[in-house]
Amino acid sequence: MVFKHSKDIDKDKDLIVPCRKGDFKHLKSVFGIESIDLEGDLSTYQLVYGPSGNRLYVLGLGEEKDANKLGEAFRKLCFDTKKNWNNSIQVYAEDLNADEVKAASIGCELATYEIGQFKSKQDKAKKLSITFASSKAIADALKEGQFTGETINRIKALIDAPANHKTPEFLGRWAEESAKTFNYKCTVLHQDQLKKQGFNAVLSVGQGSANPPVVIVTEYMGNPKGKINIGLVGKGITFDTGGLSIKSSTNLHYMKSDMGGAAAVLGIVELVAKLKLNVNIVGIVASAENAVDSNSYRPGDVIGSYSGKTIEIIDTDAEGRLVLADGLSYIIKQFQPEQVIDLATLTGSVVQTLGYSAAGMFTNNPEMASQMSSVGAKINERVWQLPLFDDFEADLYSDIADLRNFSGKPIAGAITAAKFLEAFTEKHDNWMHLDIAGVSFGDSPYSKMKSASGYGVQLLTNYIKQFTSN
């Protein structure tokens, strides 16, 4: 999709006219429309024909409380109606500020995502152009919105891809191509290098698969003389059978999405590079396939880790925290970032706790928690803080190793998983864990089956922008 900026509108061509609930004054003053059968509730719209037969889509933006969902309103309208456009349309954006223009352009771009990338017959996509008409300086907002929407669509395509295509090595190649295209550094550590460097937890998880594990290291240095500001770590389990603690076959096909955290990290680094932010950021993706084989690691095994700690395996389906443990240890020891944030589709427990409305947020840093909550609320990628009480450390006790990977209790699963990760953070003061299991992949009005949401790219990029401004 191509976005353009114009100071004037052409009233004889197709238009999207956004209106807040109950506020239709510009419909009469600008377009001469006396009345309309629309109250302006969020994401509602009505088609009105102009005097030259052109289409005017009057789009409801809802009330003030709906401000963080403006992009979703544009996305729904574009998704529903773009098939009727004549390759181009205008948006009356005089009443939108720069942030709202950015959100609208993101929504429009997201509406172009085609989930059927593996169908034998592909519909030829229209080359669509949207002109935002406003007397304000909105070109930068449009550019950022386009970059953001494009990047989210790219990582959604990664998450929605089947596991026979999306192996750990595939993720590595994706990152290398992105780095080459958008001018940042990418290093992929393959199996031999992982053995030499001691990524024992990653190797253990991946040892039952024909597709070897990798660790992907991406680096964007907006300020080459400075230190690393943000370190990101993503869980990259490209398919999760549960290992020998095998999952039920119900919805097992959706376990291709268990690399949602990795996809978010790859997308965040790519978008930061596109925007050329003045920040130094490192993204680590620890990727493996958790398969069932005669060589699979077993419940009762004791494995090593990059940190040097030993881990008793209670449940091989608690594998995501193992690869993250190596990723966290590696990024802290090798790069010493000021802040460390990991993202993972880690536990079903967080879904039971927060449903599909927010990610579980774990940190002992109140300033980071406050900033992340504020950023998430503004763009409707919400987070909700859960505790890291010392009470839960006993649930990770092992008689024969430094700690075990699963408590075995049917309660507080998201918290004990976070406590496990905390043990590998070298007591870093500025660490945050985001459990995105309920928000990364699920039901959507834009697909008939469960699909990727793209959660995390906007959230963390906006958080990083706020970090740089501070």
Image (cartoon, rainbow, N blue to C red):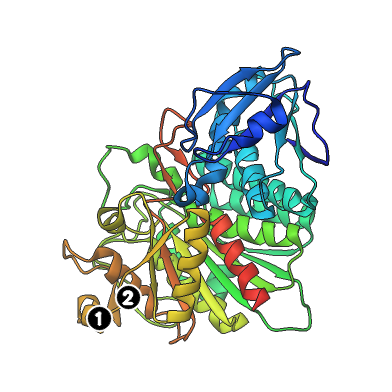
At a point 31% along the width and 70% down the height, the residue shown is 386
Residue 26 vs residue 13, the one in the foreground: 26
Q: CA distance from mark 1 to mark 2?
A: 7 Å
Amino acid type, callout 2: Lys
Residue 39 vs residue 313, the one in the foreground: 39
Mark found first going from the N terminus, 1 or 2: 1
Residue 120 makes an appearance in the image: no
Residue 212 coordinates in the image, percent (x, y):
52, 55
**Left or right of 152, for residue 315:** left
Residue 361 vs residue 214, the one in the foreground: 361
Residue 456 makes an appearance in the image: yes
At a point 21% along the width and 69% down the height, the residue shown is 407
Q: Residues within 10 Å of mark 2 (few under 14, many from 20)?
A: many
Q: Residues within 10 Å of mark 1 (few under 14, many from 20)?
A: some
Amino acid type, callout 1: Glu
Q: Which quadrant is home to the C terminus?
A: bottom right
Q: Are marks 1 and 2 in contact (CB under 8 Å)?
A: yes
Q: Can you tell which mark lies on residue 419?
A: 2
**SS label for mark 2:** helix
Residue 304 coordinates in the image, percent (x, y):
39, 76
Q: How many marks?
A: 2
Q: Can you tell which mark lies on residue 62?
A: none
At a point 54% along the width and 41% down the height, the residue shown is 20
Residue 179 sits in quarter: bottom right
Image: 160 above or below 66: above
**Left or right of 430, for residue 313:** left
Image: 184 above or below 125: below
**SS label for mark 1:** helix
**Left or right of 62, for residue 311:** left
Residue 221 sits in quarter: bottom right
Residue 288 coordinates in the image, percent (x, y):
48, 56
Query: What residue would you read off at disc 1?
Result: 393
